[in-house]
Image (cartoon, grey):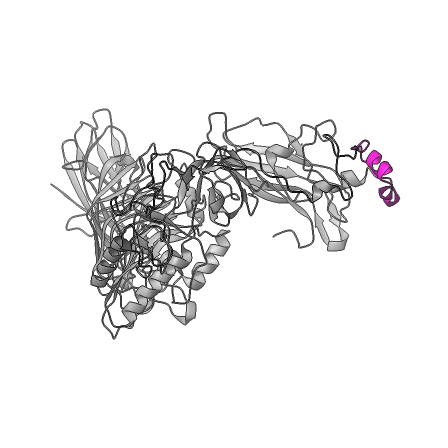
Amino acid sequence: MAVPTGVETVTVSSGKPLTRPDGTYIKGRLIFTGPDLATIPEDDFTFGGAAVARLEDGAFTVALVANDASGINPSGGTYKVETDFTNAPNWPTRYILLPKASTSVVLSDVLIPDPVAGDYAVLADASTLLAKTQNLADLEDPTAARGNLDLGDSATRNVGTEEGTVAAGDDSRFTNRRPPTGPAGGDLSGTYPDPEVAAVNGVAVSGTPTTGQVLTATGAADAAWQDPQSGSLDGAVLTTGDQIIGGQKSFTEYPVGPGWDPGYDNQLARKAYVDRLAKKPWIFDITDPAYGAVGDAVVVHDGQVAIGVPTLNCNTSARFHAGLVGKPCLIQGAGTFGVTCFKTTFATFNSATSMGLADAPPTSITNAVVVFGTNNYAAIRAAAADAEAYLAAGHTVAEVYSPPGAYILDGPLDTSKSGNGLVPISPYPTTGVKTIPTFVGAVSGAGVRHWEQQVPQVGGSCWIGFGFYSSTSAQIADIGANGNPGIISGPNEGTANGLAYGASARFSNCMPVIRDMAFVLPHTAFGLQHGAFNLYGCANAHVENVSISTLGVVPGTDYVSPGTFGTGLSIAALMPAPGNNDLTIIRNLSIQGGFTYGLFFSEHTLIDRIMTLYCWAGLCPVGNYAGSVGAVHPMKVLSASIEQCTRQVYFIGVGSEGVGPRVDIDQLQTESGTPTFDGNSTAALAGAEGKIMLTGLFTRSGVSIAQASGIELIDGQAGRAITRKTADYTASPIDRTILMDTSGGPLTLTLPNADYNPVQYIAKNIGTGTLTVATSAGQLIYPAGTATGATTATVSAGNVLRVQATYNGTAWAWYAV
């Protein structure tokens, strides 16, 4: 039960996780012992004794009643801090003082050796300063007040006009403007008051302009005054309105080409772009002047902020300029515990390496990944809205096109179209022709970060979403009401507007296509960020050459414990729900980590290549989810690389009539000592059917299925799965033929649970002793053709026993070969 409202508490946390000297997490608990009995009569509250905080990955958080809470009796005192650590014994007893003025503290900041002789290290309490004044009357006497507060005498300055004096009254220096002097800077050279133009937007220029020529900045270090008629069309032509430039007319009614500055263009370039659009009216370029998206997001990895100080420094990247004021900024690692990321806007330009922030970060960090640039939320939504208007006019295909660049989207989730996304897709009636809303980039977006890469993979045509939740409870509430969030969201499993697409075979009659795109989301330690796309309520989908990742960095601490992502519910991508009308395809999808779940996919899905790294669960075959119908038909995965995930495959819900989901994975490449297969319920794993062939680097004995299942695990590293043992052994899901060498004495081979077990085991005694084959859970082994079973069977030297689960999964049937 929580402390009653009105009683002041102080939250104590670990700050950084508690570790041993070698960096491994400390395990166990901390015990905070307060007064034997204390009362707060005005709140009818009585408390005493100890509070226990258990460590999770070395971290903890606990709220304790303040030592000086209002009305507490007795007041004052300290909390005794004792430890019960399983891997770090002999920690001495320490004490902490928790005044109510310090609403939250970090344990390492407040520990003291002794409540009497120790050196208290706590946050300042306003009462400490007030106690230094004798009474309120002292505050009316500045001299007395300064003395009581130990501030000393006030300083004085002489009034005058010479150096070292201060101005006063109507000093003329208040009204006279002094002309600038000294060397000029920026794009100017020479000295004030008559500097010269030396550059345009930071690009140096040279030469002298002549009649009919226009200033251009090509980006080269030796950019010059250039005649656009004879020079390259890539040169910049400064025009306003319709003008004659270099012998040709500039038509402002022509839109600008992809990636071009609207002020830097001419007739030939604009006309070429217009002619292209005339031939492909279904293409809606997000950088068209009608929308104005700018792919200028910058990603650096040397960010530095201090707790409570609204300033960002990037001392080595030097990428800041005054034009960034008002633009969004996301700082990884500067957020609260578990949320991890911190989002704000730039408030002031300090220098090329320093910007003022609109908000102060709650956590200090150095060498942080920082993303900043133009917010394209409105621009991209406008392009998508026009594409949908084109579909509504009777066309079947509309393409939202993103030229190469990194585009930030920072804005609220939109639930107006029965989805929950930054860029929603409207529902389409099942009675009409299927529509194909398409989101396309310029090149393959499935680039994978190198393991020595210091920044996340932001390449090609990339959309960077800034969305995340403030807590797990906020995430659960929004998903329950509106469905899982995504940058792109079709009608989904939420209940917004009273509709639940994907449930009871209700689908929007569309097939979204997402091709050659990269999506990047914030990194949160608890898996609280939005996903890339949710197509759950769409009839079909086609995803090709797509990358999804967070702003976490490998190597580093961001992905050390993928299990913590299970605190939240983030899903990188959701494909159409069970009950859709076929044709759901994934080709070359890379999910590069940081999510609770990698991919939700269901029946009729064909995946010919997927990679999922550093997620709590990698692949999630869906039998049913959020009230959908149960899956009946199978799904196929040709090649999957699932690495550093807590669970390689995680089954969601049971299929129709308790059977399924059905999935075949031809190659599941992994690097794990303990590949784990699990489900969100016993029924989900029990109903699952199919085959999964394990390849890569894994420990055979570490392969496990959390519960009984119809999934057959196959050792893809061996032509035949043959295991040789010289000691007692329990058969694993990946075993087939087990050679038990009894030369050193009798051995026992224990069979797993027969329930839903699709594996046939062959036990051979290759020694001279006796081999006993035993069951688990008291199940029986029935010899072929008999109705009498036993919990064990004996295999003499040189003989073989072959067993297979009975049809109802309650026993094993055996026969010799």
Residue at the image position 70 percent from the left and 43 percent from the top: 174
Residue 558 visible in the shown view: no
Where residue 126 appears, as percent x and y from the top left, is 74, 42
Where residue 597 appears, as percent x and y from the top left, is 36, 49
Farthest residue to the left: give it.
Answer: 817
Report the span colored magenta.
133-157
- Please identify the quarter of the rendering in which residue 302 is found: top left
Residue at the image position 59 percent from the left and 43 percent from the top: 62
Residue 43 visible in the shown view: yes
Residue at the image position 22 percent from the left and 58 percent from the top: 276
Residue at the image position 41 percent from the left and 36 percent from the top: 560
Could you say which is closer to the camera, residue 401 or residue 112? Answer: 401
Is 34 placed left or right of 312 in the picture? right
Where residue 146 appears, as percent x and y from the top left, is 82, 36
Q: Is residue 734 magenta?
A: no
Q: Is residue 134 magenta?
A: yes
Is 397 placed left or right of 473 in the picture? left
Where residue 755 appears, as percent x and y from the top left, is 28, 51
Could you say which is closer to the camera, residue 463 or residue 479? Answer: 463
Could you say which is closer to the camera, residue 146 or residue 682? Answer: 146
The quadrant the C terminus occupies is top left
Could you say which is closer to the camera, residue 17 or residue 375? Answer: 375
